Image: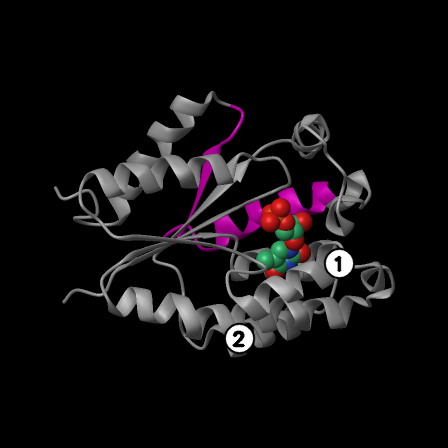
Amino acid sequence: MRRGWFITFEGNEGCGKSTQIRLLGAALEAVGRRVVSVREPGGTAIGERIRHLLQHAPEGAGLCAEAELLLFAASRAQLVREVIRPALAGGAVVLSDRYLDSTTVYQGVARRLVRAEVALVNGFAVGGTVPDTTLVFDIPAEVGLQRVAARAGAVPDRMEQESAAFYEAVRSGYLELASTDPERVRVIDAMESEPVVERAVRAVLEERCNGLFGN
Ligand code: TMP
């Protein structure tokens, strides 16, 4: 059996990636693909506990950047071995809402940890399981934050309480990543309407993932 496809979705807060994962998942299931959708941090029982610590638990308030990096990495290491690798080996399409590029950008660029050290931790956590294609949903940081604030019952989590400069750094980190690894990382203009973004996603995947849509 052909190994499946591994596609990751990245971007700033409020960029609309989760909606696009749902739309793409439905489109792929309609052509008979088995789709496994996961999110980071989380996606396993252990990972969801780590997510809680990172985003909502009161103890998270005192988390240092180094411990934060390792917790994101721990969640990912578990997800890779428990869910992603078995799914890919079984021929599924894995759609991940964030993956190692989030760490590169949030912890390496925006938190300013030493990038080579972040890369080392990332490499250890994923052990060679790298996405076939990564879509970066690009949006001005301020617009994304307004979208998040407008969500029904929105209470900002720990990662949504940073300064505007932090999210600007996230945005430029992603754009830099796309320019250094243009084969894998593609930028999608997330300011466009939902159907336009959906078509852009499909166009990239038709070009990058041969046979994904059954053509
Ligand atoms: P989200 O699930 O709503 O996208 O929230 C995840 C938050 O965690 C988001 O602010 C990005 C952040 N994050 C990191 O800082 N590093 C990481 O490695 C991952 C996966 C997420």
Q: Is residue 178 magenta?
A: yes
Which residue type carries mark 1?
Arg
Q: Residue at x 19, y 42 (%)?
A: 213
- Say which of 124 and 83 sits in front: 83
Does residue 173 show up? no
Does residue 126 show up? yes
Label 1 CB less than 8 angstroms from ligand 1: yes
Distance from Cα at disc 1 to Cα at disc 2: 19 Å
In the displayed structure, 61 sits above or below 173; it is below
Q: Which mark is residue 111?
A: 1
Sooner in the amino-acid sequence: mark 1 or mark 2: 1
Q: Which mark is residue 125?
A: 2
Q: Position of residue 54 (x, y in %)?
A: 72, 60
Q: Position of residue 99 (x, y in %)?
A: 51, 58
Circle 1: element type: loop
In the displayed structure, 129 sits above or below 52; it is below
Q: What quarter of the picture does the N terminus occupy?
A: bottom left
Q: Residue at x 70, y 46 (%)?
A: 169
